[in-house]
Image (cartoon, grey):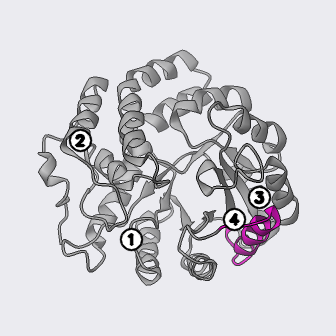
Amino acid sequence: MAPYEPGEAREWALENLRWQCGCVMPTFSSDLRGINERAIRHDVAMEKRLGMTGVLIVSECGTTLEELKQVTDIIVDAAGDDLITIAHASLPTLEDNIELARYSAESGVTGLLMSYPLTFYPTTEDEIFEYTKTLAQSSSLGAIIFAMNLWNFSRFHASDFSPDLIGGLIDEVPNIMAVKTEIGPPGTAGIAQIFERYRDRVVVTDPIEASAPVWQRNYGMRWMGTSNYECMAGEVPRYFKLLEQDRYEDAMDIYWRLHPIRQADAEVVGEASRGTSLVHRLVWKYQGWLHGFNGGPIRSPHVRISDRQMHRLRSAVEASGLPVTSDPDSAFVIGRNPE
């Protein structure tokens, strides 16, 4: 568990954040009126089985603040000492996110991934700085800057999240322990700039699985978090460990075997998410279900997943040579532990 002195969180992260941090999404009862605890515990157990070292407690599935507190307690208890846990501060208001951060710290959560509400429209970069600083310092959790292109910050910097802004936050907020960076698409120069500037001061990670060999080999990236690594079962932790052991060609053999999944994911998620700025959590949930995760219902807002998309994703897993459930897709919406 991370320390609770702000100045120590960064040192702890540089030493202890290793390998992959997946995502656990809340599952609801069949009537969508309550949390399905059995299903959530099933998914945490699967994360351990697949070799993940941590999980994001996903908040973008229609949970209320009070429900998210309940989900947090379930996941922290099920994770035990085997998985670190990251709170997901993407609730609609700063006040709710501060409350979530404080509750999570008291519940034994390790870190805080800081997102920005849909209605957050800063008119100066200072407003981004103050929002992020306020949230990061609201609890004792080690905080993760989430620098990406979906926040609509490109009016301040062409990369979508200014590298100087990131540096200013690292300078002034001692409990910032990591930067999750997806800035500057197309291309990876923006991400590389963050590695160049800050990798010796905080943990820098690109969560996109397809880029892992590049960053591990060139910048020593040791931690990938947080993303949909469950779509490849336990193969991402497996090949990442091979990269760390300097068994590059062995790792790349696995990497290329997984490429059908990577291609199908890009196609389906790109199609479903175009123009929405939403992470397609229902697709992620389906991809995990193919490998034994619970599946089951989540609440709106989400884009519907079609039979054609499910067939594309299932066929890709089969093409990669990984085992895939024989259950019909109709069983996905019910889940493996229905309540």
**Visible residue check, residue 168:** yes
Instruction: Answer above or below: position of 182 versus 117.
Output: above
In the rendered structure, the answer to whether residue 22 lies left or right of residue 117 reads left
Give the residue type at disc 1: Gly
Mark found first going from the N terminus, 4 or 2 = 4
Q: Which residue is mark 4?
A: 142
Q: Residues at badges 2 and 3 in contact (C-beta under 8 Å)? A: no
Q: Residue at x 26, y 34 (%)?
A: 312
Residue 81: x and y in percent read: 51, 62
Q: CA distance from mark 3 to mark 4?
A: 7 Å
Mark found first going from the N terminus, 2 or 3 = 3
Q: Which mark is residue 310?
A: 2
Q: Residue at x 28, y 32 (%)?
A: 317
- Span colored in magenta: 121-142
Residue 234: x and y in percent read: 39, 39
Tag 1, which secondary structure? loop
Tag 3, which secondary structure? helix
Q: Which residue is mark 3?
A: 10
